[in-house]
Amino acid sequence: MKTFRFFLLTLLLPAASQACDICGCANSGSYFGLMPQSNKSVIGIRYNYLSFTTHPNSQVLRTEEKFNVTELYARFFPIKRVQVMAFLPYRMDQQVTTSGTKKQNGLGDMTLLANYNILNTLMDTESSSKFSHTLLVGGGIKLPTGRFKYDENDVLQVANANFQPGTGSTDFIVNAFYTVNLNQWGLGVNVSRKFNTTNSQDYKFGNQLFGTMDLYRSFKVGKITLTPTFGLYAEQSGRGRKNELLLDETGGKQLNGTVGVHLFSNRWTLGVNGQKPISQRSNSGHVVAKERVLVQLGFLF
């Protein structure tokens, strides 16, 4: 029976306001979960749900914002040590206030990543071993394929930057992934940094930093590998800028606990992951991040 080895990936989801300002709502990082450490290509789809409450203690100003992101993703190995990944999201956002509900749908921003396997004992040795570890380092680019346009004077719109399907800017990403496996146990650590640029409307989202640490254990169930995971997810966002002016009410920090389960076969992978905030601080002091849910399905070929 083939033994699966995994690496952990955190993706930066495109599209982030002055309302959801902890780390930019749907522009925040998105925990991706485990992927098999094989040279097989993967293509799949995933669904990510995020929600935030603004002014939770006010009966007049209280606002609920929900983000539903469905995303196509793919992973390829053009050469032995180079991994290329692509992500294309579609967003369905909803804002509920005391005066009514507003919705907005649209294509989000595409992300392209390339990582180099500096260290991979599973790839470098022909014989199987109880111990393996891998280190990938690389980066990528987020393209402004999603729409970023709103009118602050239009009462029918959600007039904030975060509620737009895209950010309107070309942004740059650097990341590193380290995973160690011993027998059926594993630990994955990921750090990602996103550098945002100013868009055509002179708005710039704050730069963002993301990190994850997950412990997992694999079990054989017939021809399927069952892998429960639990760990931590952290994100930090700097303050944004509008017309070169610093927006003091944007940016913040958040730490989430994560738990999930993944199923792997030789041809497909299925995973479910949930996050619950442990601690958080928005610079405005009025935004509360709620639980997050991720479901993903991939096919290996």
Image (cartoon, helix red, strand yellow):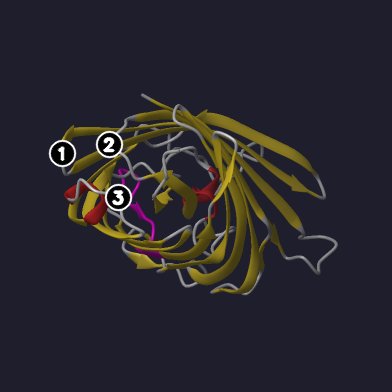
Mark 1 or mark 2: name the one nearer the start of the chain: 2
Mark 2 or mark 3: name the one nearer the start of the chain: 2
The residue lying at 29 percent from left, 52 percent from top is 198
Q: Few, some or many C-alpha atoms within 10 Å of disc 1 (few <14, some 14-19, many ≥20)?
A: few
Q: Amino acid at mark 3?
A: Ser
Mark yes or no: residue 120 visible: yes
The residue lying at 32 percent from left, 30 percent from top is 41
Q: Quick one: SS at disc 1?
A: loop
Q: Main secondary structure of the magenta part?
A: loop
Q: Which residue is mark 2?
A: 39
Q: Amino acid at mark 1?
A: Lys
Separation of residues labelled 2 and 3 (CA atoms): 15 Å
Residue, far right: 59
| Left or right of residue 110: residue 96 | right
* Magenta stretch: includes residue 209: yes
Cβ–Cβ below 8 Å for labels 3 and 1?
no
Q: Which residue is mark 1?
A: 80
Q: Amino acid at mark 2?
A: Asn
Q: Which residue is mark 3?
A: 128
Separation of residues labelled 3 and 1 (CA atoms): 19 Å
Q: What is the count of numbered marks?
A: 3
